[in-house]
């Protein structure tokens, strides 16, 4: 059976958008998308290709964002994804801004910011110190949750992280469900650059929740006052992140829809 999809990205973190308002197109017997279908859709050779899938399901008088990583695993939240999801809802479902979107990590509010979008990502949780390792080299890391788990490691040079073809080693006791690992270098005042190995997707060109975790960890390290806006450069583009005085994280960046079509995958 053919069904409609769209393709979009936020700073080159790319996603397959699946309109499924009644939850009937992609929900199996349990109403859930199969991991096998997600993997097929995200396959960059035999499928459409993507770092994840954003399934749009109506829930009550709003929309639920069912996010899956490219390996089919579920994540609580996706920062670049929710901007792309909001762009889809605005342009194809007539949803006005500001809009409220339901996610596994609660309701998020998205609004326009010029040509870009700002997502209120809610309260960060700073959960202590841990460490990560790559090819026998270890770094201290800050454990930050943005609804999903992150380990933020400050390095002198992003190349130190190596090819990032495998997940960095981490403490399974701290991250029983796996972890997104960010490597960060400073570029100037309130300006950092990062790479990320994403749980369930591998190294991606960008990670929105990762950029938020990085900005929180950097603001703490800097002793920066709340309300400071950090510029976060990623391989796929730039995001701006503010940890506000009322302890919320606002992330601003682009969201682009590049194609739509039908598939039998
Ligand atoms: N791989 C992440 C989810 C996607 C995060 C990233 N794409 C973002 O923009 O936040 C996880 O398993 O928690």
Image: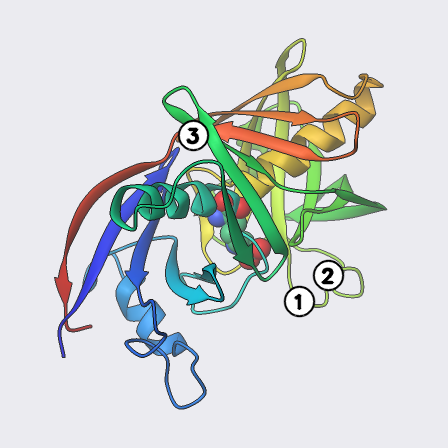
Query: Tag 2, which secondary structure?
Result: loop
Residue drawn 29% across the image and 62% down it? 19
- Looking at the image, do the residues carrying marks 3 and 1 touch, with CB atoms under 8 Å apart? no
- Looking at the image, do the residues carrying marks 1 and 2 touch, with CB atoms under 8 Å apart? yes
Camera-side residue of 99 and 70: 99
Snapshot quadrant of residue 175: bottom right
Query: Of the residues under marks 3 and 2, which one precedes in the sequence?
Result: 2
Q: Which residue is mark 3?
A: 235
Residue at mark 3 to residue at mark 1: CA–CA distance? 26 Å
Q: Which residue is mark 2?
A: 175
Confirm if mark 1 falls within 8 A of ligand 1: no
Q: Of all residues shown, which one is farthest toward the top?
A: 189
Q: Which residue is mark 1?
A: 177
Residue at mark 1 to residue at mark 2: CA–CA distance? 5 Å
Mark 3 surroundings: few (<14), some (14-19) or many (≥20) residues within 10 A? some
Q: Is residue 109 above or below residue 220?
A: below
For the N terminus, the quadrant is bottom left
Query: Tag 1, which secondary structure?
Result: loop
Q: Position of residue 50 (x, y in %)?
A: 32, 53
**Tally of marks:** 3
On screen, residue 167 versus residue 69, left or right, reads right
Mark 1 surroundings: few (<14), some (14-19) or many (≥20) residues within 10 A? few
Is residue 243 visible from the viewing direction of this image? yes
Q: Of all residues shown, which one is farthest toward the bottom?
A: 29
In this picture the colour scheme is rainbow
On screen, residue 82 versus residue 178, left or right, reads left
Q: Position of residue 240 (x, y in %)?
A: 55, 23
Camera-side residue of 115 and 125: 115
Mark 2 surroundings: few (<14), some (14-19) or many (≥20) residues within 10 A? some
Residue at mark 3 to residue at mark 2: CA–CA distance? 25 Å
Snapshot quadrant of residue 63: bottom left
């Amino acid at each position: 059976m053919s069904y409609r999809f769209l393709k979009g990205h936020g700073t080159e973190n790319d996603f397959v958008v699946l309109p499924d308002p009644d939850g009937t197109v992609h929900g199996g017997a349990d109403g859930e998308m199969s991991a096998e279908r997600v993997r097929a859709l995200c396959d960059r050779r035999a499928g459409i290709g993507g770092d994840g899938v954003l399934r749009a399901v109506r829930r009550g008088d709003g929309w639920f964002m069912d996010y899956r990583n490219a390996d089919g695993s579920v994540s609580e939240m996706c920062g670049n994804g929710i901007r792309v999801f909001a762009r889809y809802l605005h342009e194809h479902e007539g949803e006005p801004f500001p809009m409220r979107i339901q996610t596994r990590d609660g309701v998020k509010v998205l609004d326009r910011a010029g040509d870009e979008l700002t997502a209120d990502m809610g309260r960060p949780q700073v959960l202590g110190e841990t460490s990560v390792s790559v090819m026998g080299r270890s770094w201290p890391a800050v454990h930050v949750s943005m609804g999903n788990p992150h380990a933020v490691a400050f390095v002198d040079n992003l190349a130190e992280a190596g090819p990032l073809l495998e997940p960095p080693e981490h403490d399974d006791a701290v991250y029983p469900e796996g972890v997104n690992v960010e490597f960060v270098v400073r570029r100037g005042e309130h300006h950092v650059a990062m790479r990320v190995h994403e749980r369930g997707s591998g190294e991606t060109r960008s990670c929105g929740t990762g950029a938020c975790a990085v900005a929180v960890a950097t603001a703490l390290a800097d002793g920066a006052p709340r309300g400071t806006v950090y510029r976060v450069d990623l391989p796929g583009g730039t995001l701006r992140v503010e940890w506000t005085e009322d302890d919320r994280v606002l992330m601003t960046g682009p969201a682009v829809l590049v194609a739509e079509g039908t598939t039998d995958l």
